[in-house]
Image: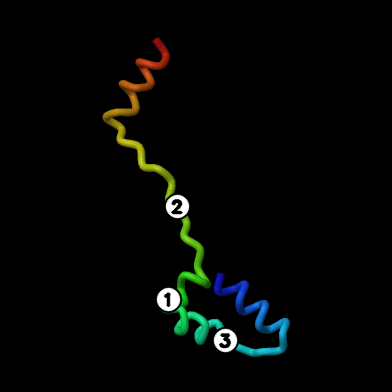
Amino acid sequence: MIRTLHEGRRADGDVVTISKLCAWFGVPRRTVYYKPSKSAPKLNDKFVDPIKAMIEE
């Protein structure tokens, strides 16, 4: 949303920084710049082998 506003304002000739837009809307800047990344699921070894054995039966 912030990036869309920033691009639209720039296309209209108004220069408004992303920092200022974030301040106006009360949004942290990091939410605009950084995308969350999910970590790989962690497998618990004590469950992996019994479940594999059940599936292969």
Answer with the quarter of the image where residue 17 lies. Answer: bottom right
Q: Residues within 10 Å of mark 2 (few under 14, many from 20)?
A: few
Q: Which of marks 1 and 3 precedes in the sequence?
A: 3
Q: Earlier in the sequence, mark 2 or mark 1?
A: 1
Q: Quadrant of the N terminus?
A: bottom right
Which structural element holds mark 1?
Answer: loop
Q: Please report the residue visible at 52 percent of the width from the left and 82 percent of the height from the top.
A: 21
Foreground disc of the pair 2, 1? 1
Residue under label 3, please give it: 17
User: Residue at label 1?
Assistant: 28
Mark-to-mark CA distance, 3 and 1: 13 Å
3 up-or-down from 9: above or below: above
For label 1, the crowd category at 10 Å Cα-Cα, with few meaning under 14, some 14 to 19 and many 20 or more, is: few
Ranked by sequence position, the earlier of labels 2 and 3 is 3
Residue 33 location in percent, x, y?
A: 52, 72
Q: Which residue bears the numbered disc 2? A: 38
Is 3 rendered above or below residue 14?
above
Q: Amino acid at mark 1?
A: Pro
Q: Quadrant of the C terminus?
A: top left
Local packing at callout 3 (Cα closer than 10 Å; few below 14, some 14-19, many 20+) is few
**Disc 2 element:** loop
User: Rounded to the nearest whole Å, what is the CA distance between mark 2 and mark 3?
Assistant: 29 Å
Helix, strand or loop under label 3: loop
